[in-house]
Amino acid sequence: MIAKLAFGAYFLYFYTKPQTNKTKISSWLSEGGGVLAKIKNYTTMEWNNSDTDDYRVVLSTYWRSISNYAGFQARAGVYIFANSNNQVKYIGKAGARRMILEIPDAIRRGKDYGATIVKVLYTNSDANAQSLETDLINKYDPPNNLT
């Protein structure tokens, strides 16, 4: 199991032993458990507009307030949550006719933490949405996506 701990602009990844009881990361760290695996600097995760030129993207929207998602089309695609500096916080996908359902669901699950704006990249199929989401997550490694 990997635990992810925010530390300023950095995230620390620790390998942990699976535990049956839920303990807080802070108490786990104070006990000295685990080994530091890697430190990642998340200052380079700013959205690159050239990603809208991907062959799987048939239409993209402008950035808009995260609370203003109701105007999106109910199509397959990928949505990106970011902060006001266009730093990507979460990338999710929606299957056919599910975009306006998936975005509020992600918000309810707390995936919008630190995000203020949202952008949608529409695709012409669920398969293209899945592969685009995977590629973008691998590229940006957003902090609100589980590792």
Image (tube, grey):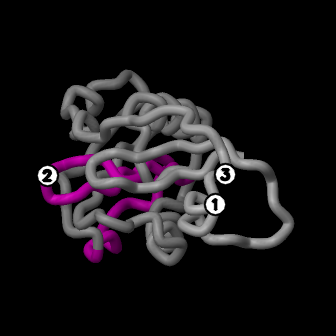
Q: Is residue 36 above or below residue 111?
A: above
Q: Earlier in the sequence, mark 2 or mark 3?
A: 3
Give the SS element for disc 3. loop
Residue shown at 30% from the left, 65% from the top: 114
Q: Judge depth for marks 1 and 2 and give the one in front.
A: 1
Q: Mark 2: which amino acid?
A: Asn
Query: In the image, residue 48 lies at what x, y percent?
Result: 21, 32
Q: Earlier in the sequence, mark 1 or mark 2?
A: 1
Give the image quarter of residue 8: bottom left
Give the SS element for disc 1. loop
Q: Nearer the viewer, residue 69 or 7?
A: 7
Q: Judge depth for marks 2 and 3 and give the one in front.
A: 3
Toward the left, the furthest residue is: 85
- Which residue is the site of mark 2? 85
Query: In the image, residue 65 lies at what x, y percent?
Result: 21, 69
Magenta residues, start to end: 67-95
Determine the CA span between mark 3 and mark 1.
6 Å
Residue shown at 38% from the left, 60% from the top: 73
Query: In the image, residue 56 lies at what x, y percent?
Result: 43, 28
Q: Mark 3: which amino acid?
A: Gly
Determine the CA span between mark 1 and mark 2.
37 Å
| Label 3 Cα neighbours within 10 Å, binned few <14 / some 14-19 / many ≥20 | some
Give the image quarter of residue 103: bottom left
- Which residue is the site of mark 3? 33
| Label 2 Cα neighbours within 10 Å, binned few <14 / some 14-19 / many ≥20 | few
Toward the front, the furthest residue is: 31
Which disc, if any, is residue 31?
A: 1
Decide if residue 64 is on the left or right side of residue 93: left
Q: Is the C-beta separation of discs 1 and 2 under 8 Å? A: no
Toward the top, the furthest residue is: 55
For the question of whether residue 74 can be seen, the reply is: yes
Q: Nearer the viewer, residue 80 or 4?
A: 4
